[in-house]
Amino acid sequence: MKEFKKVISDPVGLHARPAGLLVKQAAAFKSKVTISGNGKSADGKKLIMLMGLGIRKGMEVICRIEGEDEEAASEVLQKFFEENL
């Protein structure tokens, strides 16, 4: 299992556009992706679940990746969070 944390710096938080892009990135991998924050957890491949987390600017999220391609998925998703959120 791979895990990383990120404090959200986007002024609007985890809103529809980056959440949709995040789902696309996560769906490209076989590994299970779980995003946790604001006291909740969601499947990183399901847009509605991600939006339900209510992640705002300044909140910390934890991304957990588990599966056969977790190494590659972790690298791609960390880069995505740094560039988009």
Image: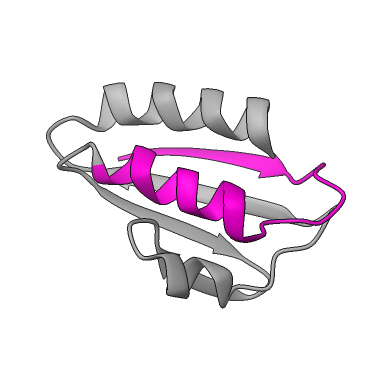
Q: Position of residue 50 (x, y in %)?
A: 50, 66
Question: Residue 5 appears in which quarter of the rendering?
Answer: top right
* Residue 72 located left or right of residue 3: left
In the rendered view, tell whether residue 30 sits above or below residue 13.
above
Q: Nearer the viewer, residue 32 or 48?
A: 48
In the rendered view, tell whether residue 78 sits above or below residue 7.
above
Instruction: Identify the coloring.
Output: one colour
Q: Position of residue 81 (x, y in %)?
A: 60, 35
Q: Position of residue 34 (x, y in %)?
A: 39, 57
On the rendered image, what quadrant is the N terminus found in?
A: top left
In the rendered view, tell whether residue 83 sits above or below residue 5.
above
- In magenta stretch: residue 43: no
* Label tally: 0
Q: Position of residue 30 (x, y in %)?
A: 15, 42
Which residue is drawn at the image coordinates 80% and 44% (left, top)? 10
Which residue is drawn at the image coordinates 72% and 52% (left, top)? 60
In the image, the segment drawn in magenta is 1-27
Which residue is drawn at the image coordinates 76% and 56% (left, top)? 13
On the rendered image, what quadrant is the C terminus found in?
A: top right
* Residue 76 located left or right of residue 14: left
Question: Residue 14 appears in which quarter of the rendering?
Answer: bottom right
Q: Residue furthest front?
A: 17
